Image (spheres, grey):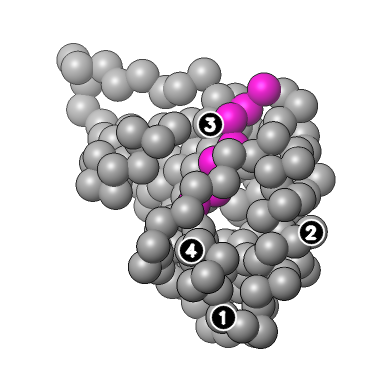
Amino acid sequence: MLLKRNKHSSDLVTSKLYDQDGFYKAFTKDLNKSRSRVIIESPFLTRKRVTSLLPTVEKLINNNVKVIVNTKPLDEQSPELYNQAYWSIAKLQSMGVLVLFTAGHHRKLATIDDGILWEGSLNILSQNDSYEIMRRIVSINVVEEMLRFTTIKKWC
């Protein structure tokens, strides 16, 4: 169920910051509560990180949650990650994930059920050994603004 904005009430914004150590636990908790749509924008994909999220993605697909991943085209992936990106994309697509490709892509964000936005510096589908930051924002209006700004909504 997509969260609905009530035009008669204000959209109170709450947010919390996470680093690379706390992000995946909180993000997976949000994913597990999703009921309608998850959009993940991650320029890079690694087999290790995608594999760690596959059980959750499979659960979402089985619960009829639409999962969309937007990433760089394969010809823009770094040579050392090309094979991992290829494997990851094929695996996600075989599960029913809609994979979109955006040239020059470098955004790192996710939206969950049009009510939660994760944004920051962390590549959600490839982060491994780096110090990162992600902000979790709960706001229908902020998510709507991001989807409109990135124009991804027209593709999903």
Rendering quarter of residue 46 = bottom right
Mark toward the viewer: 1 or 3: 1
Whole-number angstrom distance, CA of label 3 to CA of label 2: 20 Å
Q: Earlier in the sequence, mark 3 or mark 2?
A: 3
Give the residue at x 66% y 84%.
80
Mark toward the viewer: 3 or 4: 4
Residue 35 placed where, x, y %? 60, 25
147 left or right of 94? left
Q: Earlier in the sequence, mark 2 or mark 1?
A: 2
Q: Are marks 4 and 2 in contact (CB under 8 Å)?
A: no
Report the front residue among 45 and 135: 45
Kindly identify the amino acid type of the residue bearing the numbered disc 1: Ser
Q: Which mark is residue 37?
A: 3
Circle 2 crowding by C-alpha within 10 Å: few under 14, some 14–19, many from 20: some
Circle 4 crowding by C-alpha within 10 Å: few under 14, some 14–19, many from 20: many
Mark toward the viewer: 2 or 1: 1
Q: Are marks 2 and 1 in contact (CB under 8 Å)?
A: no
Residue position marked by numbered label 1 in the rendering: 78
